[in-house]
Image (cartoon, rainbow, N blue to C red):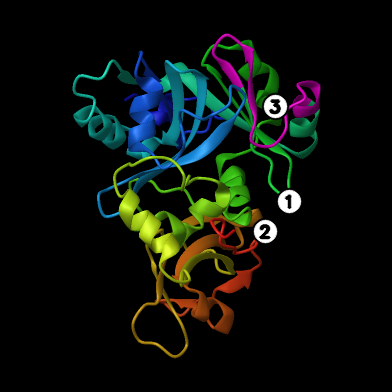
Amino acid sequence: MSSSSSLPAFAMKSWQLLSVHGADASSFLHSQLTQDVKGLASNQWRYAGYCNPKGRLYSTSLIWRMNPEHVFMMVPENNADFLLKRLSIFIMRSKVKVCPMGTEMLAIGLFDQAATALLNSNTLYAGEFCSLDENVFLLNCSSAQQNRCLIWAPADSLYLAKYAENAVTEAAWQASDILAGIAHVDAITREAFVPQMINFELLGGVNFKKGCYPGQEVVARSQYLGKLKRRLGIGKVMDAAPVLAMSDVYTANTEQPVGRVAAVASAENNRGWLLAYESPLSTQTAGSLHLADGRAISPLPLPYPLVDITAD
């Protein structure tokens, strides 16, 4: 894949678009992902996970379906080659091709007024997408805290040039994801978490009524056998020194780590770090969480309730 260094400054370099097309595109992905791909409406985008046989996430993604024979997957750029090879193993005789779009398709993000104006002009609600032009896609990714959207378009598209001035930095988008309680699984965190550990089912990323997929039994067992004890929390570290994904998280009363950092982003004005971390719920409510070097993690509220979405 092409080096991200050649991309325009406004482009989101940490994302890659995969085009999955062919007569069996929807049914193939339906059998591989945690999402009900065949049941996606024509205007819906949804989160989806790809798990190993033990239910640990290889990757998370955003997916949308142009039609039953063409699905797009927005995946972490550093995980795209792995996913391409992994999915290819299981294609076998299926009539489907998975193609990386490389730098042919780029993404930019908009916040607040710029996002609101564009979304309103297209009557687009959260979780929906539309085509602004051929191969130009607008996704409403608004959270409870903020209106925001993504535009995917060919690198030479006039839409990218039109909105480039209002495009947010990638660091700002990553911070917005964390504040929305979203932690994407990429090459660094690959196979570290089952979906519920990062609250992925609460984001609509797991459909418990669909058929089998790799790791489905483990994911279902985690959901149905007793209360989930490990969850994603979000917090802030007030120190400019870097915090890395997969860093250990401790409490004041433990010598062994109780959790791991799932995602990080620079806080406002680079004065610290926002992080999403996975640990037992009991440690999150007890407080006094810190990194291995002693830096304290100040907890922030999740923007959604921790509920059992499968409860009647």
- The spot of residue 114 in percent (x, y) is 77, 31
What kind of residue is marked 3? Glu
Asked whether disc 1 touches disc 2, contact meaning CB atoms under 8 Å apart, the reply is yes
In this image, 197 relative to 133: left or right?
Answer: left
Task: Confirm whether the magenta stretch covers residue 133.
Answer: yes
**Among the 4 quarters of the image, the one containing residue 178:** bottom right
- The spot of residue 174 in percent (x, y) is 56, 47
Residue for badge 2: 303
Residue for badge 3: 165
- Can residue 287 be seen here? The reply is no
- The spot of residue 222 in percent (x, y) is 39, 62
Quadrant where the N terminus lies? Answer: top left
Seen from the viewer's position, the closer of residues 41 and 284 is 41
Magenta-drawn segment:
118-137
Residue for badge 1: 145
Looking at the image, tell me whether mark 3 or mark 1 is earlier in sequence order. Answer: 1
What kind of residue is marked 2? Pro
Secondary structure type for disc 2? loop
The 10 Å Cα crowd at callout 2, few under 14, some 14 to 19, many 20 or more, is few
